[in-house]
Amino acid sequence: MVRIPRRTHSVSGPPSAHCVLKDVACCCNMVKIQQFYMAMMALRRNPRRKCKKEETPIPVAQDHTDHWTSKRLLDADTQRSEPVRLPRTVRLPREVRDQVYANLVVRRGRHIPIIEAKSILREQKKRTTAQRTRERLNLKRAQTGRRPITPREAVAEPIVHLNVLQASKLTNYEASDCFYQQNWFAVSIDNFPATTIETPSGWDYGRITKMQLELQLKDAQRMNSYIDWIPFFAQFPALRSLRIIPTFHSRYYDWARSELSDWNTAHYIFRAFFRELLATIPEGLVLKLGPSSDPEENMKLEGKASVHRRVLWDMYAELGTRTDSGESRDFVAVGQIVDYGPMDAMKGQDVVG
């Protein structure tokens, strides 16, 4: 009995799908796969037209570096050919944009724009505590079938409007630059010998240019430790203006004030404290000691009272060695460091924070 081979395709037409798929079933037959792909693409372009034989491209090893380089150049040309639509704010001159940023990210309502870290953290802690208390009460009310407590939506005016930083990358850079250059940032240290500070999340120490540093002093027994100020000032490489305000801690006010009421009779621990502090302050800063003599400048101090300006005057007159940044390199006068005048000498009392 003679076996007749089965016909798999027509005499005049192209190979049937069964024949093509049978050859394509093996993943090693790359040529057949490429032919099948070309035939399908031809049918998709024009189903009524018969499939034409297309030459299978021979894979040639190419340099991927040139391929990606040409692709990037093509994308760049395409981007340049398309019209670029800039926001309306970016079209304004830089001076006008800076004025807009100053109205949004610079604190208003004060003679000097000061942003206190302690007050912000205190408000955040207050809101967190209220939320936890409300959640605990709502859990008890839900067990008894009562309605939960809903907080009142109090509309509070923010200190600064930082939502503008989310507009674009350019706006974020320019507005944040204005935020760190025109505001004073007030921090307080009350846990010596540690020099760690608590600030709200998001503060970039490397961009702060103006800082008000409050030092809450305790009695000599609790201040008897070496304090390394070099790592602290290294966190602020862009700092240009610094005002240091020594105050008395509210808990140790009676003991500390009696030991630092006069610089000539001050405890030796406080004398060493200020000597190490002045020796580590970086050169080139505009330094001020003590609170400002201007009554309109509300410092919002955390301590009970600040050290009297007369004590700071005598202290810097004895320990101060700062020189002028100009060519003369003369010593900076005490009057340029401490705001102390005749009226302060007549009062002779501490400034309450």
Image (cartoon, grey):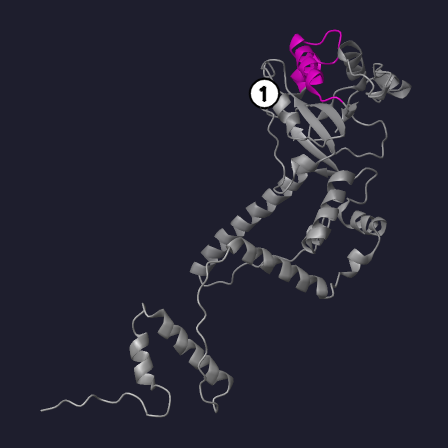
Is 207 rendered above or below residue 158? above
| Kind of element beneath mark 1 | loop
Q: Is residue 210 left or right of residue 296?
A: left
Q: Main secondary structure of the magenta part?
A: helix
Specify whether residue 143 is in view.
Answer: yes
Q: Is residue 93 left or right of residue 117?
A: right
Residue 123 position, x and y percent, is 64, 43
> According to the image, label 1 marks what residue?
193
Residue 150 position, x and y percent, is 57, 59
Q: Where on the picture, by quarter, is residue 120?
A: top right
Q: Residue at x 85, y 14 (%)?
A: 330
Is 141 rendered above or below residue 218? below
Residue 326 position, x and y percent, is 85, 21
Viewer-closest of 160 and 33? 33
Residue 319 position, x and y percent, is 75, 11
> Which amino acid lies under the numbered mark 1 shown in the image of this protein?
Pro
On-image quarter of the C terminus:
top right
Residue range of the region highlighted in magenta in the rendering: 254-283
Q: Residue at x 66, y 35 (%)?
A: 205
On-image quarter of the N terminus:
bottom left
Specify whether residue 250 is in view.
Answer: no
Viewer-closest of 160 and 283? 283
* Residue 264 is covered by the magenta coloring: yes
